[in-house]
Image (cartoon, helix red, strand yellow):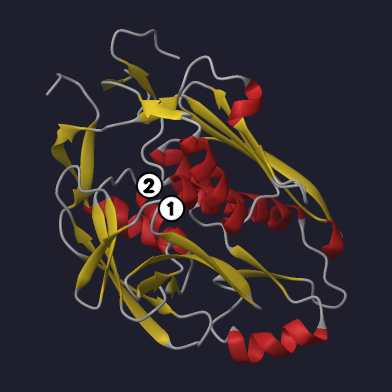
């Protein structure tokens, strides 16, 4: 192993996560187990381990929300995107997610609770982290995926570190565009992203009725409820909305692999579009191995290629 290289990490022991299935309202539990170097992420469902990758990820939608599931041979673990985001945010490369039921639970006080638990149990292995970065020389059009029938788009650009820019807007809900740029580090993820609640729009009588039956686990503690009659989101809630979209996007990027020196600019993306866009960008050859990566002195969470100038 190269001296000073950033190494892969897992958990020191199994983490038990208590929460609620937001669709049924029932108490639920999830276990996150340690895994060996180079194993990556996987889910454990009915006695079988399934790799969590772009190839096993499937989008599903319900009236009260959409989610990413990992599926194979009739086995399925649903709503994995937030657990994957927290693992990536905590700098954990190898882990097995075992939901107690079909759905991964939402912790009672949100995903900061999950991030904090993962961070406390994080332990480094012995193998250098195998980063991906943006292929050099790709024309902009090849790095850009757009929805021809909507505003969704993802653009990859060269960058120092991993930088995610997100623009979210919900004009049908009276919410103007909100934009944020997030320069990834474990510390910033924990303080700026991990606590952001996911939005649930209850702006019609039908949705409010559906929430009583199909979203029984949705609470003001674990969700950002919007669209109620006469409700206006505060400035901090508007910021929380776009921060949660970045949390979601990191969950999708976790299926690609560890990323370095790449900028990801997203506009109005959801789970379905993001999964399809990253598959298409992979097909175009946008993601390539980065090479050995070393810690940058003076600031944890910033990295540079071996032999390269620090950003």
Crowd around label 2: few <14 · some 14–19 · many ≥20 (10 Å): many
User: In the rendered view, would you say 254 is above or below 224?
Assistant: above
Viewer-nearest residue: 182 or 60: 60
Asked if one can make out residue 298 in the rendered structure from this viewpoint, the answer is no
Q: Do tag 2 and tag 1 residues touch (Cβ < 8 Å)?
A: yes
Asked if one can make out residue 288 in the rendered structure from this viewpoint, the answer is yes
Q: How many marks?
A: 2
Q: Quadrant of residue 121?
A: bottom left
| Disc marking residue 136 | none
| Disc marking residue 88 | 2
x 14%, y 40%: residue: 125
User: In the rendered view, would you say 244 is above or below 135?
Assistant: below
At mark 1, the secondary structure is: helix
Crowd around label 1: few <14 · some 14–19 · many ≥20 (10 Å): many
At mark 2, the secondary structure is: helix
User: In the rendered view, would you say 293 is above or below 229?
Assistant: above
Q: Is residue 224 left or right of residue 257?
A: right
x 48%, y 16%: residue: 136
x 40%, y 77%: residue: 19
Where's residue 264, x and y in %? 57, 34
Where's residue 209, x and y in %? 72, 90
Image quadrant for the C terminus? top left
Image quadrant for the N terminus? top left
x 55%, y 50%: residue: 276
Where's residue 14, x and y in %? 19, 64
Q: CA distance from mark 2 to mark 1?
A: 5 Å
Q: Is residue 186 left or right of residue 150?
A: left
Viewer-nearest residue: 302 or 201: 201
Viewer-nearest residue: 112 or 100: 100
Q: Quadrant of residue 8?
A: top left
| Disc marking residue 85 | 1
């Amino acid at each position: 192993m190269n001296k000073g290289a950033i190494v892969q990490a897992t958990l020191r022991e199994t983490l038990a996560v208590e929460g609620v299935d937001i669709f049924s309202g029932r108490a639920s539990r999830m276990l996150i187990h340690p895994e060996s170097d180079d194993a990556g992420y996987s889910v454990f469902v009915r006695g079988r381990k399934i790799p969590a990758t772009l190839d096993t990820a499937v989008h599903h939608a319900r009236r009260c929300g959409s989610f990413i599931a990992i599926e194979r041979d009739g086995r399925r673990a649903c709503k994995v995107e937030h657990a994957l985001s927290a693992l990536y945010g905590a700098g954990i490369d190898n882990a097995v997610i075992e939901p107690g039921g079909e759905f991964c639970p939402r912790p009672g006080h949100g995903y900061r609770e999950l991030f904090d638990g993962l961070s406390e149990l994080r332990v480094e292995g012995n193998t250098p982290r195998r980063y991906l970065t943006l292929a050099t020389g790709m024309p902009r059009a090849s790095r850009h995926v757009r929805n021809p029938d909507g505003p969704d788009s993802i653009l990859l650009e060269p960058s120092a570190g991993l930088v995610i820019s997100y623009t979210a807007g919900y004009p049908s809900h009276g919410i103007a565009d909100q934009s944020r740029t997030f320069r990834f580090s474990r510390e910033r993820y924990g303080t700026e992203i991990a606590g952001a609640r996911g939005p649930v729009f209850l702006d019609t009588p039908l949705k409010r009725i559906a929430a009583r039956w199909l979203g029984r686990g949705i609470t003001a503690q674990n969700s950002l409820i919007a669209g109620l009659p006469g409700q206006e989101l505060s400035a901090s809630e508007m910021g929380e909305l776009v921060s949660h979209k970045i949390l979601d996007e990191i969950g999708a990027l976790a299926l690609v692999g560890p990323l370095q020196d790449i900028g990801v600019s997203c506009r109005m993306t959801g789970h379905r579009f993001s999964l399809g866009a990253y598959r298409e960008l992979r097909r175009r050859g946008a993601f390539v191995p980065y090479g050995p990566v070393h810690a940058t002195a003076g600031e944890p969470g910033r990295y540079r290629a071996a032999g390269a100038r620090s950003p």
